Image (cartoon, helix red, strand yellow):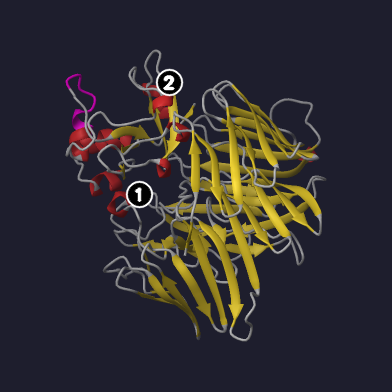
Amino acid sequence: MNVTRAMSMTRQGRLTAEQGAQGAIRYRRDALGNPESLTLPDGRKTEWLMYGSGHVQGIRYNGRLVSDITRDGLHREIIRSQGALTQYSGYTRSGQMAWQRIIRGEYAGSGIPPEAESENRKDWRYSADGELIMETGPHGAELYDYDRAGWLRSHSPAQGVQERFHWDKAGNPVNEYETVADNRVRAWGKYRYEYDEWGQVILRGEGRSEKTLAWDADGHLLRVISGDRTTHYRYDALGRRTHKVTRTDMQDRAENETHFLWQGTRLLEERTGESRKTYIYGDARSPVPVACAERRAGREEIYHYQTDPSLRIRTVTDETGKVVWDGCWQAWGRMQADLSGPGGFEQNLRLAGQYYDRESGLHYNLFRYYDPDVPGRFLSSDPIGLAGGINLYRYAPNALGWIDPLGLIKVFRNLRADESVSDGLSAKAPGRGMSAAGHVRNGSKSTFKGSQFISTTTSEEVARQYRGPGQTTVTFDTDNVIPDAKGNRSIIDLSTTEKATEAGLKGPASNYATSSSEVLVKGHVPPDAITTC
């Protein structure tokens, strides 16, 4: 059963209110369309203080300060207050996060705060290809190794057993000499899987125990049956999960029931009984919150998240600086160990955009469900079809340099003189049947009259490199793309040699697309989805 939604927008297509079963979420925006505040149905409010073209420098929740943020000349966050703590961050020359220090109070010096003053310290090292190869933190050093295509081959954790991975040419996890004929993994370690005719997992076995899964015609997971427990799920008209309830065969009443509230494609709030957790985001683009406000037993407290370069939450602290949650991760998003102890803070966020369902062991990933026990696998095929690659089930070559917050890519573009944020973005020739290769080969020619594609890149550095005089660089998430004037919508990722080859590119066209980390967008990008850099 789907829950009806109603939207209110300005003439420019900017969302001002969203009405649902739990009431209305309202937005106030600045002249550029950046959100200045978000008001929840009960009147609670999150506010963002910004400068320039929309860079956040302060966050408040219901009148309380959450964080003050200091940025460098490239607008990257370098200092963030977190209650009694302050987080300092530094970057490599290529823009990747190199170190993070968390101290009590503020650091009076310059450069990297000394280890003696750090409550928590982390350092990261990268290969010449930009892949994360070493992470050093409170629990020791973690090592990562990759093949030439960037697929993760091994993970040596600071605690626990080394993980090793083998892949077939389609990106399926296999034992060393196995192949997967149709990209549907039917066995992995102690787990076994059965699929329906639409390619959705309907049985997930582990030893003698089994979980049965049922799906609706739109590809939404409706229920999971495990022993005498059945969990039911409901979604709204946009496909976002709004409700889950678990019952046992012996009880008519719900054993556990949770309601979810959304801000676009980001989880805004979850409610279970009298408890609620409201997620607070640092800007309009990030899929991972910087903090949450949790209400239990009539009291509401703010908790702060500390994340790594992959946006995995490593620790959670309260306003006094006490660590209330501490987790160790396996390479593909499975929580190896929760070190916070019994009765601690419940932290259900996993890889970016994923929510851990304790009743099933799966991760809800907005448009799909992710299985953390099999390397980089979804339980159903990609709803955008082959535009996401020839393997409809895989997550990415690795979960360290890649994220897929919607189970479906943040991209950048330099606006032409005839384009503006207020009008949104559309291709020059919607409905034209040009191939991706043809667009790449001809797009830079002065005689090019346009195609059905909008050219973008996954690299802000590439966009900055090619930005001409007077041009503005913008960014948007591809999940916010809507059908164009001809009713078409698709995303073609050409950012790697493998993906460009899958899309039919070869020779110079492939080289140009991959060197530019290009992504072709077919559709319209609403003004509300665009942020200037």
Q: Is residue 444 magenta?
A: yes
Q: State whether residue 312 is above or below residue 52.
A: below
Where residue 481 sits, quadrant-wise, is: top left
Q: Residues within 10 Å of mark 2 (few under 14, many from 20)?
A: some
> Which numbered circle lies on residue 108?
none
- Identified by mark 2, the residue type is Thr
Q: Is residue 286 visible?
A: no
In the displayed structure image, the side of residue 33 where residue 316 appears, left or right: right
- Identified by mark 1, the residue type is Ala
Q: Is residue 299 visible?
A: yes
Circle 2 residue: 472
> Which numbered circle lies on residue 149?
1
Main secondary structure along the magenta-highlighted residues: loop
Looking at the rendered structure, the secondary structure element under dot 2 is loop
Q: Residue drawn 22% across and 39% down?
A: 436
How far is mark 1 from mark 2, CA to CA?
A: 33 Å
Instruction: Compare residues 67 and 161 and report the one nearer the observer.
Output: 67
Question: What span is colored magenta in the figure?
Answer: 440-447
Q: Residue drawn 62% across and 41% down?
A: 281
In the displayed structure image, the side of residue 181 where residue 434 appears, left or right: left
Q: State whether residue 221 is above or below residue 525.
A: below
Q: Is residue 315 magenta?
A: no
Looking at the rendered structure, the secondary structure element under dot 1 is loop
Q: Residues within 10 Å of mark 1 (few under 14, many from 20)?
A: few
